[in-house]
Image (cartoon, rainbow, N blue to C red):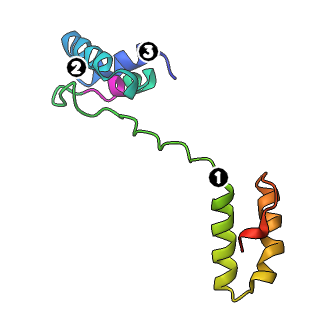
């Protein structure tokens, strides 16, 4: 992140006065954790009298929830579905399923086929 005086100079150069800068800082605080300090810096550098303090913020999009943990059944379904589509028999699928279960950290349990 750059020097804050640069951001303030850019705001001033764009015709933004102290009240507008304080309004930007106030809005930054209201946004809370949705924006970083870098967002305030960016917003100050791009401030303009015609752009309201509440507009033009690079609000972070919510992060996707972490993927759910893979279960043995997930491995089973993926392997069996893929290999059945390829025309393999249960006897041909069984070793592939065992390898996939072990690779995913599970005990081999090919009795489900």
In whole angstroms, how far apart are the C-alphas of marks 3 and 1?
A: 46 Å
- Foreground residue, 54 or 60? 60
Which element type, helix, strand or loop, lies under badge 1? loop
Residue of label 1:
70
105 left or right of 46?
A: right
Relative to residue 66, is residue 18 depicted above or below? above
- Can you give x and y, in whole percent of width and height, for residue 35 in the image? 39, 27
**Dot 1, how many residues are within 10 Å of its Cα: few (below 14), some (14-19), or many (20+)?**
few
Question: Is the C-beta separation of discs 3 and 2 under 8 Å?
Answer: no
Q: Residue at x 68, y 86 (%)?
A: 86
Q: Closer to the N terminus: mark 2 or mark 1?
A: 2
Question: Would residue 43 be counted in the magenta stretch?
Answer: yes
2 to the left or right of 52: right
Bin the neighbour count of mark 3 within 10 Å (Cα to Cα): few under 14, some 14-19, many 20 and up.
some
* Residue bearing the label numbered 3: 4
Residue 78 percent across, percent down from the top left:
64, 68
**Residue at image location 23% in from the left, 32% down from the top:** 55
* Mark 2 closeness class: few <14, some 14–19, many ≥20 residues within 10 Å: many
Mark 2 vs mark 1, CA separation in Å: 53 Å
User: Where residue 45 sits in the image (x, y, percent)?
Assistant: 36, 25
In the picture of the structure, the residue carrying the numbered disc 2 is 16
Relative to residue 47, is residue 74 drawn left or right?
right
Q: Secondary structure at mark 3?
A: helix
Quadrant for the C terminus, please. Answer: bottom right
Who comes first in sequence, dot 3 or dot 1? 3
What is the magenta range? 42-47
Residue 28 at what x, y percent from top left?
31, 20
SS for dot 2: loop
Frontmost of labels 2 and 1 is: 1
**Residue located at (33% from left, 22% from top):** 44
Of the image marks 3 and 2, the number of the one nearer the N terminus: 3
**Can you tell which quarter of the image residue 27 is in?**
top left
């Amino acid at each position: 992140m750059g020097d804050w005086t640069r951001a303030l100079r850019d705001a001033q150069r764009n015709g933004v006065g102290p009240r507008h800068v304080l309004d930007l800082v106030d809005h930054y605080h209201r946004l809370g954790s949705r924006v970083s300090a870098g967002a305030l810096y960016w917003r100050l550098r791009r401030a303009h009298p015609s752009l309201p303090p509440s507009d033009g913020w690079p609000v972070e999009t919510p992060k996707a929830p972490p993927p759910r943990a893979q279960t043995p059944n997930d491995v089973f379904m993926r392997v069996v579905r893929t290999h059945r589509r390829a025309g393999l028999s249960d006897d041909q699928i069984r070793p592939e399923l065992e390898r996939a279960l072990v690779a995913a950290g599970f005990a081999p349990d090919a009795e489900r086929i």
